[in-house]
């Protein structure tokens, strides 16, 4: 007979797998599940998806609340195929939006120093609280060579970004 703890663990894992499948379906470009560097994080924000979307998609002002980012510049309208540039961790990143679904999903690809990244955000609101899930994969020569440190840095950076987004949206 299966214990309650084991059954709860199985249900929790199944819920995460379903959520990841839904994220992958909504995105025009999916993260690379076989990339050497990848991370997925989630946070609950006590704000409606409309507010979270407004903060997250105001790319030109990311540096006002996300202090690890500098010089963000969206090169046109917030729509798929629009490029933007930004700097984080000393690296200049050239990105292109691949998914823009208001209040629901935002995704982009990015290139820097021979690295290629796919970064996807999904918003799901319930009763004025928004669950924000972010997935990123990175590949390229440096990602393969420094897999362990890149994975650690990505995980730390994503957690910081989510916490900064939460703080900004709940002000």
Image (spheres, rainbow, N blue to C red):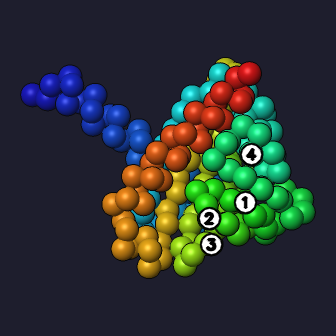
Alpha-carbon neighbours of circle 2 within 10 Å: few (<14), some, or many (≥20)? few
Q: Position of residue 98 (x, y in %)?
A: 71, 64
Observer able to see residue 18: no
Q: Quadrant of residue 6?
A: top left
Residue ID at (70%, 23%): 170
Q: Nearer the viewer, mark 1 or mark 3?
A: 1
Residue ID at (74%, 21%): 171
Q: Position of residue 90 (x, y in %)?
A: 61, 61
Mark 1 or 4 closer to N-term? 4
Picture layout, residue 67 above or below residue 149: above
Alpha-carbon neighbours of circle 3 within 10 Å: few (<14), some, or many (≥20)? some
Give the Cα distance between marks 3 and 2.
10 Å
Residue ID at (63%, 35%): 164
Picture layout, residue 138 above or below residue 129: below
Q: Nearer the viewer, mark 1 or mark 2?
A: 2
SS for dot 3: strand
SS for dot 1: strand
Which of the numbered marks, if any, corresponds to residue 111? 3
Q: Which residue is mark 1?
A: 86
Q: Which residue is mark 4?
A: 63
């Amino acid at each position: 007979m299966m214990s309650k703890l084991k059954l709860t663990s199985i249900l929790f894992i199944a819920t995460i797998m379903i959520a990841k499948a839904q994220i992958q379906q909504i995105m025009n470009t999916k993260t690379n599940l076989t990339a050497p560097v990848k991370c997925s994080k989630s946070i609950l924000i006590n704000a409606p998806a409309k507010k979270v979307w407004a903060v997250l998609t105001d790319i030109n002002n990311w540096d006002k609340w996300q202090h690890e980012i500098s010089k963000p510049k969206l090169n046109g309208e917030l729509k798929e195929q629009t490029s933007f540039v930004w700097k984080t961790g000393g690296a200049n990143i050239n990105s292109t939006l691949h998914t823009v679904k208001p209040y629901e999903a935002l995704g982009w690809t990015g290139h820097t120093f021979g690295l290629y990244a796919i970064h996807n955000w999904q918003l799901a609101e319930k009763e004025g609280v928004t669950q924000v899930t972010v997935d990123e994969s990175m590949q390229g020569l440096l990602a393969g060579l420094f897999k362990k440190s890149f994975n650690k840095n990505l995980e730390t950076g994503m957690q910081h970004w989510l916490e900064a987004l939460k703080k900004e949206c709940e002000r």
